[in-house]
Amino acid sequence: MTLLTIDKLDDDPDSLKILFKKYFQPLCHLSVHYLEDPDEAKGVVQEAYVKLWEIRHELNCDSNLRNFLFTLVKNNCLNLLRRKQILLMHHEKIRWLEMHYQYESLARMGDDYLEFNELKEKIDLAVHHLPEHCRHVFEMSRYDELKNREIAEKLGISQKTVEAHLTKALKILRNDLKDYLPAIATFTSIL
């Protein structure tokens, strides 16, 4: 079979359909390899075909469309991952600032409540003493703010198992921190 080139794409409108049918699945496979999300991967591939159509007149007539599409999809995936990383860093910075302001507020509250550092130490110690799997799931849920589905996918376990670990962790923490629950409930949303 001959290579599809830009000049054939311009001359024959069905060439885009042929190109789509021939490379859509391999391009999706490549995209899923980078993004690990089939829906996002399909979107990136579709955007590559749109981009090809939009700039087809600007490309060299002898351009290999297969190589062009694979390069375009790879670069778009990497760009998307970079944008996600930037958003994640921004989100983490905001979360840190929010926690910082909460800590400052608690530190200024006076003697009516436990010293914040003592409360934080008690919570950290209680979390540290959770069974390993419960602790890991709890931290992913509460500190990393992941949904149960996301935790299940990352750990390769069912959502029911995630829910069971969270339930167990919360039960243990409520018991271990029962003397501090009023202060914790006032200041944080951990439990």
Image (spheres, rainbow, N blue to C red):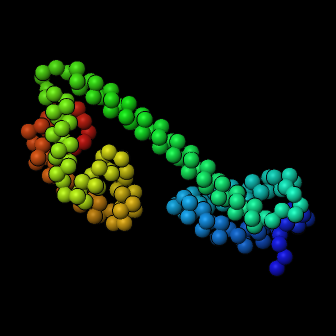
Residue 40 falls in image quadrant: bottom right
Question: Eyeballing the image, is 26 above or below 109?
Answer: below
**Total numbered circles:** 0
Residue at the image point whose x is 56% and y is 51% from the top: 81
Q: Position of residue 159 (x, y in %)?
A: 33, 62
Residue at the image point whose x is 65% and y is 70% from the top: 26
Q: Position of residue 160 (x, y in %)?
A: 29, 64
Question: Eyeballing the image, is 51 above or below 99?
Answer: below
Does residue 123 appear anywhere in the picture?
A: yes
Quadrant occupied by the N terminus: bottom right
Residue at the image point whose x is 19% and y is 31% from the top: 117
**Which residue is more in the foreground, 89 or 27?**
89
Residue most extreme to the left: 179
Residue most extreme to the bottom: 1
Question: Eyeballing the image, is 105 above or below 162?
Answer: above
Q: Is residue 162 left or right of residue 81?
A: left
Does residue 46 appear anywhere in the picture?
A: no
**Which residue is more in the foreground, 11 or 69?**
69
Q: Is residue 70 left or right of residue 53?
A: left
Q: Is residue 172 left or right of residue 155?
A: left
Residue at the image point whose x is 65% and y is 66% from the top: 27
Q: Position of residue 173 (x, y in %)?
A: 16, 48
Residue 66 falls in image quadrant: bottom right
Q: Position of residue 145 (x, y in %)?
A: 36, 47
Quadrant occupied by the C terminus: top left
